[in-house]
Image: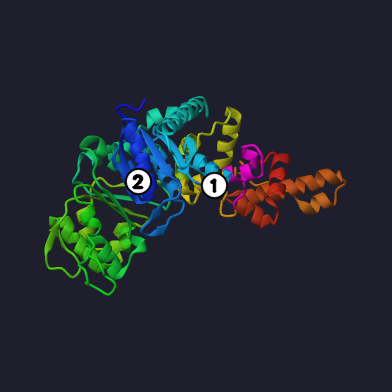
Amino acid sequence: MFEKRKILFVEDDSLEIGNISVLLRSLGVGFTHTATVSEAVRELVLQPYDYLLTDLHIETKAGFEKPDGLTVIRAAVEQQPNITIVATSSDPRTEVVNAALTAGAHHFVRKPLSKADEIEIAFRLANQRRRLARGSRLKTPSGLWEAYAKKYPYGIILGEREHKVARLAARKKASCIITGETGTGKEEAAKLIHRMRCEEDGPIPFVAVNCATITGNLAESLLFGHKKGAFTGADEAASGYITEADGGILFLDEIQTLSIPVQQKLLRVLNDGSYHRLGEARTHRSEFQLIAASTKDLGKEVDEGRFLVDIHMRMMGLDFHMPPLRERMADLPAFVALFLSRKNIALNVDTLDDLIEKLQTYQWQGNIRQLFKCLDAWLLYCELDCVTLSADNFPLFKDLQALQRPVARAQGPKDEIDFNTAANEDRDFDQLMADFERTIVSNAMSRHGSISSLSKALNIPRSTLDAKRRKYNLI
């Protein structure tokens, strides 16, 4: 079963490391061991594995990380969808087991593991459950995700921009600027460029930096590294992100937030690959592909003096824009199908269609990230309330705004009624009031471009307004 298979084994307890390593060797399999979350995630990005065996509670130098092994499991699901995952823990509580299975594990086994058979059986059961889950995904939701997967081999996040990414992966020295609102998938696009390059060149580094979270000397130190004692608190030397990215990809998110001095130093690296670490005269070199991302118009940032024109010109390459979700609503069904596939959730056709129809009524100002967060909350609420997964049970979030759709305007001239004449004639009262009401609503529709502004102008609740529009055929 395990011949020529690769296992990633994640554990930080020295006794368990020795024990399980002996058991794995007795099964005759090759395995790689990591002791921290960051090391495990890095392995999953750079190397293909058939199996993941991970503890759920991992101690690192930075302290007790949360959610520990769950982070490793989620990274495995995202980076290697066909991997078989077994979670371990000495804590057998139901909530611990459920958390592991919800994150994407196929089986849970309690520690300590004392026999090789226990590991073999655990992976056999996990394999069976993974195959069953894959079977349910192929049937529902209506084969939707499989259809999109054929259309977008590298993921729906890129959509029609996939051909540009393929060109970037082929031109390994070309820089790139990815623009778009928060949550549109800019970092995901960068990771897909990295994945394409790994397929061609083998494992290469991918170093992601959120520039908005680093300022001043911290930014220079983290990017370029520093010598021991270079500043107060520099108790050890640090190589820096640029050193780590040598031979691979450096992804700088929100690059426009870097200070001008740091931009100037970065420009030199981009020109000839050379740089100095803080407090050090020695020249270092690093060659990498730069992928920058920004929620701002960098041209405007240059005009306003916040971004160097030289570095902007140096970075220009096969740039592309990630449009907001509200401008690519045709792709929303694919995002829903992707989410359900990752969660191993099957919905019948009617339920899926109702859910997608409801989700398409919102603006998704937080874009794809917000969509996935809301779907996660929907799963949780339905589970806690013990109700079925349905569109009717999708929670109403305060920060979700309805998609503004143009109101159908009345054709022809405005309705005109002579109120004085009508008031002095003997007419059916109910019909007269209905005519007045229809005229008021129809004429107001001609002045307002959206239902929300119309409702506010007439001081009528949205539900009441919708009822009147249906009554008078003003839809």
Give, as a single range, the part of the protein colored magenta. 377-397
Q: Residue at x 60, y 54 (%)?
A: 398
Q: CA distance from mark 2 to mark 1?
A: 28 Å
- The amino acid beneath tag 2 is Ala
Question: Which mark identifies residue 288?
Answer: none
Answer left or right for 33 relative to 365: left
Q: Residue at x 59, y 40 (%)?
A: 358
How many residues crowd around disc 1 within 10 Å: few (fewer than 14), some, or many (20 or more)?
some
Answer left or right for 136 relative to 53: right
> What's the image's color scheme?
rainbow
Residue 144 position, x and y percent, is 48, 29
The tag earlier along the polypeptide, 2 or 1, is 2
Answer left or right for 193 relative to 16: left
Q: Work out whether residue 217 or residue 261 is closer to the camera in this orientation and state it.
A: 217
Front: mark 2 or 1? 2
Q: Work out whether residue 276 or residue 456 is closer to the camera in this orientation and state it.
A: 276
Which quadrant does the N terminus fall into?
A: top left
How many residues crowd around disc 2 within 10 Å: few (fewer than 14), some, or many (20 or more)?
many
- The amino acid beneath tag 1 is Cys
Residue lying farthest to the right in this orientation: 426
**Residue that numbered label 2 is attached to:** 40
Residue 15 position, x and y percent, is 38, 47
**Visible in this render: residue 2?**
yes
**Visible in this render: residue 157?**
no
Q: How many marks?
A: 2
**Residue that numbered label 1 is attached to:** 374
- Is residue 382 on the magenta stretch? yes
- Secondary structure at badge 1 equals helix
